Image (cartoon, rainbow, N blue to C red):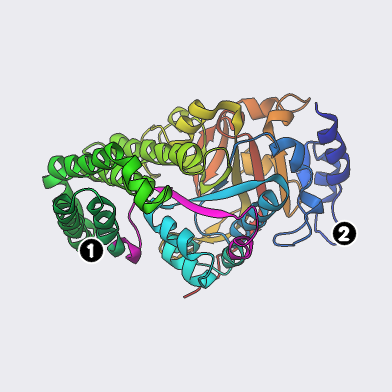
């Protein structure tokens, strides 16, 4: 093992003063369970153990076990600030619309952080816990290594979607004004149908999938064919965003029209993996990227998890993390997040209870008495007493639904939170 990691373990397995803990659990705590002392502090001394673990990574994925836990949002916001300030990660990619996050990135240097946040991200993260991260992002934009915002989702969730038809038109018009009008009409038509609601939207997309998919694919191909000329007139990034958003829209149309749930899930996640590759390799080449998304999307081998009928998608389907891992290998480090107990909120902001975990489960085995803890699975899985990390074990999806995972096959590290509460929403 790296000596720096051993040194970190020696320092950070101590329980910080004032933290509640069970003395038996503390006595039995494995030496590879590391302590994080603060949810939101600006002193990063307790995070320095992450340096040797993450310093060589190109992409770090920060998973969450559900979209509605205050403590998970707060500690990952802090991790982003630390990884930007001290390890040189300069891009933050959210599980939100590629186009809307582009609008937010453009607005970030001068805009109000709360406006940047709410126009960029899906509503589950419109919270007081995430807002300081956007204030921090703004504060970096005048520096030599600004923290840039990106999105990798294909779902066009957010009112800023209405700005996209004119955006597409502006890009295409520098080459072909007549086709630009056609593109404007295409995306306006999509928006009009999208805003009719879920049932009407899906019916429209299923009936018109071939036409719409081909139209957005044609748009992407047109931009790619004229990319150099467009970039000379509009700058490097805008045509790239337009091309990738057109590809995203084609994928979204095909996803919504899919008849099988496996296809529905995989089309979206494959397109998200493609968007993340675009962010890392084309939009911000050479820069280190942080990814913020659900455990389901970032884990490495979702298709190996036995299907759970009561959990989306209810079938064994590949998710984004499998393609990301396939593409980047050990240059991607994926952190899964789990909680022991508490209360969280679902995507509609309705609270739900998370009971104490059953004996023998992942959450029970890692309930070490620490408020916040971290396990580097790449190291821990090679140490005595860790064989269970390489075997199937029950864990709870969203803190509620049991599923069987092999921890080391899904994640490179685990962030454990003893107790969670619902977020504080901005509105």
SS at circle 2: loop
> Which quarter of the figure is the N terminus placed in?
top right
Q: State the residue in front, 374 or 192.
A: 192
* Residue most extreme to the bottom: 427
User: What element does badge 1 sit on?
Assistant: loop
Instruction: Please give the name of the residue rendered at 46% of the width and 75% of the height, measured from the top-left corner.
Output: 427
Can residue 156 be found in the magenta stretch?
yes
Lower sequence index among marks 1 and 2: 2
Q: Is residue 425 above or below residue 371?
A: below
Residue located at (82% from left, 39% from top): 28
Is residue 415 left or right of 237 when viewed as pictured?
A: right
Is 154 within the magenta? yes
Task: State left or right for residue 165 relative to residue 150.
Answer: left
Q: Which residues are magenta?
A: 136-161
- Residue 359 visible to the viewer: no
Name the front one of labels 1 and 2: 1
Which numbered disc covers residue 17? 2
* Total numbered badges shown on the rendered structure: 2
Q: Work out whether residue 270 can be spotted.
A: yes
- In the image, is 41 to the left or to the right of 76? right
Q: CA distance from mark 1 to mark 2?
A: 53 Å
Which quadrant holds residue 350? bottom left
Residue 171 image offset from top left, x and y in percent: 29, 53
- How packed mark 1 is, by other alpha carbons closer than 10 Å (few <14, some 14-19, many 20 or more), is few
Please tell me in which quadrant of the rendered image residue 138 appears.
bottom right
Residue at 40% x, 44% y is 311
Q: Nearer the viewer, residue 3 or 189?
A: 189
Neighbours of disc 2 within 10 Å: few (<14), some (14-19), many (20+)? few
Q: Nearer the viewer, residue 19 or 282?
A: 282
* Residue 342 spot, x, y in % from top left: 60, 59
Q: Kindly identify which residue carries mark 1.
A: 195
């Amino acid at each position: 093992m790296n000596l720096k990691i051993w040194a970190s373990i020696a320092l950070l397995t101590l329980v910080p003063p004032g933290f509640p803990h069970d003395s038996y659990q503390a006595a039995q705590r494995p030496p590879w369970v590391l302590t994080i002392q603060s949810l939101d502090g600006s002193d990063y001394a307790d995070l320095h153990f992450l340096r040797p673990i993450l310093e060589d990574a190109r992409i770090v994925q920060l998973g969450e076990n559900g979209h509605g836990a205050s403590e998970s949002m707060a500690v990952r916001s802090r991790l982003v600030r630390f990884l930007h300030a001290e390890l040189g990660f300069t891009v933050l990619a959210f599980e939100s619309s590629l186009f809307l996050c582009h609008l937010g990135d453009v607005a970030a240097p001068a805009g109000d952080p709360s406006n940047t946040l709410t126009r960029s991200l899906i509503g589950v993260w419109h919270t007081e816990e995430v807002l300081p991260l956007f204030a921090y992002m703004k504060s970096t934009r005048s520096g030599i290594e600004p923290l840039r915002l990106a999105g990798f989702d294909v779902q066009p969730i957010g009112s800023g979607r209405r700005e996209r038809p004119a955006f597409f038109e502006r890009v295409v018009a520098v080459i072909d004004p007549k086709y630009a009008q056609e593109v404007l009409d295409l995306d306006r038509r999509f928006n009009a149908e999208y805003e009719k609601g879920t049932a009407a939207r899906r019916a429209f997309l299923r009936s018109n999938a071939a036409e719409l998919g081909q139209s957005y694919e044609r748009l992407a191909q047109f931009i790619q064919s004229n990319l150099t000329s467009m970039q000379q007139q509009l700058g490097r990034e805008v045509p790239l965003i337009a091309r990738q958003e057109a590809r995203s829209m084609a994928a979204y149309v095909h996803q919504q029209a899919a008849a099988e749930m496996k296809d529905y899930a995989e089309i979206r996640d494959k397109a998200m993996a493609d968007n993340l590759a675009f962010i890392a390799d084309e939009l911000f080449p050479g820069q280190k990227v942080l990814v913020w998304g659900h455990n389901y999307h970032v884990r490495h081998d979702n298709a190996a998890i036995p299907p759970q009928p009561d959990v989306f998608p209810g079938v064994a389907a590949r998710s984004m993390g499998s393609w990301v891992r396939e593409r980047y290998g050990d240059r991607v480090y994926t952190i899964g997040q789990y909680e022991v107990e508490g209360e969280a909120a679902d995507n509609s902001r309705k609270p739900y209870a998370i009971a104490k975990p059953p004996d023998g489960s992942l959450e029970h085995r890692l309930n070490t008495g620490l408020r916040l803890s971290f396990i580097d699975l790449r190291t821990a899985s090679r140490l005595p007493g860790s064989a269970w990390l390489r075997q199937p074990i029950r864990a709870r999806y969203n803190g509620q639904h049991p599923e069987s995972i092999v921890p080391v096959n899904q994640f490179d590290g685990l962030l454990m939170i003893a107790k969670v509460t619902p977020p504080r929403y901005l509105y």
